[in-house]
Amino acid sequence: MIETCSKRCMLFGTVSLGILTIVVLILESHLADTLSGSQRRNKTFPTENNSTCWLTQPFTVISECHPCSDFEIRSKSIGVCIHTSFKEILRCENGETVTKSCDRVAYLEERKFWKFTIWSFFMGSVSSVAVMLRMRVLNHRAKRRARQVLANGTI
């Protein structure tokens, strides 16, 4: 079945599957953020000085979730960096500043995803070019053999 498809049909199928994959990833990312946003806020992570004001009071995020420095992890100067290697700084309504451990850094996860996607596209492109070049060489050899057989007159 696949042998009967033209190059244009194969290219159209590949491009449409690629677009469909990107749309699904975008939708999945959007739905994951909206559906689990409330669950993530209720997830308990270690906090500095055992303060839990962020659980009972309104708070503002001073510093979004970001990786701890190597020094903070090795020296264990900030206890929340030991658990997940990420920290988030919050300020509660009563003025208390809390450093709490957090799950992941969104921009780092996104960067890893795009690196993987670009690397996969690059490797796929190189492989595709290699296959086309090999096909061209094999077709050329087959044509040369056919010409030799026809030139010799022996079939």
Image (cartoon, helix red, strand yellow):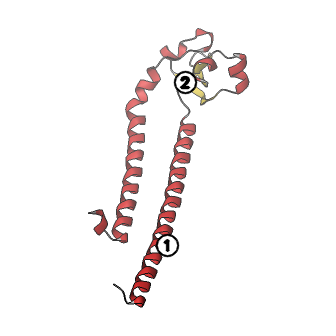
The reply to whether dot 2 and dot 1 touch (C-beta < 8 Å) is no
Q: Nearer the viewer, mark 2 or mark 1?
A: 1
Q: Is residue 150 left or right of residue 54?
A: left
Question: Quick one: SS at disc 1?
Answer: helix
Q: Is residue 154 left or right of residue 141?
A: left
Decide: is 132 above or below 148.
above
| Badge 2 density bin: few <14, some 14–19, many ≥20, Cα 10 Å | many
- The amino acid on which the numbered mark 1 sits, given as a three-letter code, is Val
Quadrant where the N terminus is found in the figure:
bottom left
Label 2 sits on residue: 102
Q: Please report whichever mark, 2 or 1, sits nearer to the chain's N-terminal start.
A: 2
Residue furthest top in the image: 50
Question: Quick one: SS at disc 2?
Answer: loop
Mark drawn on residue 124: none
Q: Which quadrant would residue 14 be assigned to in this image?
A: bottom left
- The structure residue drawn at horizontal position 33% and vertical position 71%, both measured from the top left corner, is 6
Mark drawn on residue 137: 1
Front residue of this view, candidates 73 and 80: 73
Q: Position of residue 2 (x, y in %)?
A: 30, 63
- The amino acid on which the numbered mark 2 sits, given as a three-letter code, is Cys
Front residue of this view, candidates 24 and 35: 24
Q: Position of residue 60 (x, y in %)?
A: 56, 26
Quadrant where the C terminus is found in the figure:
bottom left
